[in-house]
Image (tube, rainbow, N blue to C red):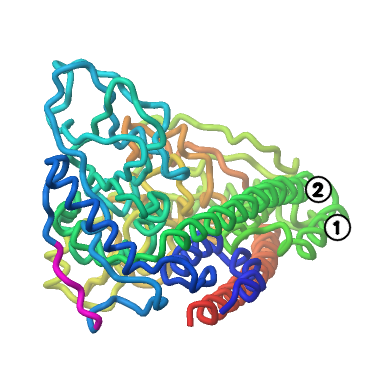
Amino acid sequence: MDFKTFLEHFDTIADAPNGIPKLRSLILDLAVRGKLIPQYSHEISAVKLLKDIDEQRKKLIKAQVIRSRNAEPIEQAYEPYTTPTSWKWVRLCEVTHDLGQKKPDVTFSYIDVSAIDQEQGSVSSNVSILNPEDAPSRARKLVKKGTVIYSTVRPYLLNIAVINQEYEPESIVSTAFSVLHPFDGVSNWYLYYLLRSQYFTDYVERYQKGVAYPAISDTDLLQAPIPLPPFEEQIRIVEKVDELMTLCDRLQAAKQTRDTLRQKLRGSAIDSLMNAERDEELQKGWAIVRDNWVELSQSPEDVGDLRRSVLQLGIRGKLVSPNSNDEPVEVLLSQAKKDREVLLTQGKIRNQKKQLQTYEFSWEIPSHWAAIPVDSVAFSYDHLRIPVNKDERATRKGNIPYYGANGQVGWINKSLFDEDLILVVEDETFIGRTKPFSYLISGPSWVNNHAHVLKPSNAILPKFLDFVLMYYPFAPLTSGTTGRRKLTQPTLMGIKIPLPPLNEQTRIIQKIEHFWNLCDRLEESLRQSQQQAEVLAASAISHLTI
């Protein structure tokens, strides 16, 4: 692979989902394998360089500036991968040393994890100047300009930096860092890129210990085998990586600009749908969305916004035209009262004990619709719910769906209900929720006490009631101080909902489902485009890393 071939695949990889992070990783992978730039025979080999480094080490040890570190030899058979012949595999401790430790006795500059700029690989201006009495107990390791520091606690966060200046007073870092000061002939920025590469990350993951706060010891870190190129090649590698990372920065900035523009255009297209007053305007707005959605979207998940917008159009009376032959809603409300009497007589429902406080919805509805409380057209079966814990369900295995606040959560051997019902979240996350608040169930079922159970009357179709409640603005009506809030039964039964004539409900449902089918096709088209981009990127990466 040559650099020209790499550039030919650059845009293909960048355009794929999560492509730019993959591209950055690939750049580092190629760099530390000697595949990013050519090698030149006139450059001093790593074998000679390592001899020079060994002489430096001996002098510093003799002068008692550094301590001796034992490095286990690396047999050729155990080299992690093949490198150019001018390179050499060495232990990390063979090409770096520490600068000692001290307990601060005067004012000092303290560098901790919060001062690391991960994107730039440098120390930010957030460096504390501390007095000895304020020194954290772990502040002991000395560093200076040119030192590479690597956080050995939660190393997957890649808190790695090159100290880019001399600090006055002297600088000290936490013992959570491993101090890697390179010998002359070793580029600190080459080390930095190596430490960020997937190869080195994989090595650390093999040796780190712990779960919540995994960490690798200094000993294991320093015994890591690393590929050492000639010094001049290290410099050229760093220059090329810098150049390509800058190109990645530009691509990322351009992508963010495109995504922001797409988001605005997508919002504008949806607004045109929501503001349609006549059927012709609606059809025109939908045509614009349908024909341009792939260009307006970044991912299949974006279709969710369109799906919810279609739903809102339906329950606001903007998807279908009225029909003067439809039975008026007053007849439906009269039927709902009769249904209530029947269910009360059968003992399936109870009279509401608490006075309902009605809650108005904020959108306008057609004049021939009615705005009525849920209690007027649906009845609560909450008193029939029975929670069954997981252990007990394990002893009652069956084929009856067991439902909770977020849908089916298991199975059980017996049913509580056997009819069309609407389940509504009772206690769950309401703020910032993307899942629907309600869902329709049919047939034999069992429901626990985390979902309200509504039985629709003959005045409202179950699916229409579900559509109305799916994304109802419940959050301001819930109680509680934590993320998990509660929607009480009196509140649910008191909220006002729109009620169209029954035949119009049917037409609205059909229209919503028609548009949702189109949304499914848009979503699938986006998914296929995304998969194709991923396949192309994977093929390019495979070709480049051979």
Give, as a single range, the part of the protein colored magenta.
71-76
Q: Amino acid at mark 1?
A: Lys
Rendered position, 205 above or below 115: below
Q: Are marks 1 and 2 in contact (CB under 8 Å)?
A: yes
**Which callout, 1 or 2, points at the residue further toward the start of the chain?**
2
Secondary-structure class at tag 2? loop
For the image shown, how many numbered marks are present on the structure?
2
> What secondary structure is the magenta-colored segment mainly?
loop
In percent of the image, x 59 and y 55: which residue is there?
243
The residue indicated by pointer 2 is: 276
Question: At 40% across and 52% down in the image, what residue appears?
Answer: 187
Q: Is residue 46 left or right of residue 513?
A: left
Locate the N terminus by quadrant.
bottom right
Q: Report the residue marked by disc 1.
A: 284
User: Residue 65 or 258: which is nearer the viewer?
Assistant: 65
Q: Is residue 500 something that shows in the picture? A: no
Q: Is residue 209 shown left or right of residue 535?
A: left
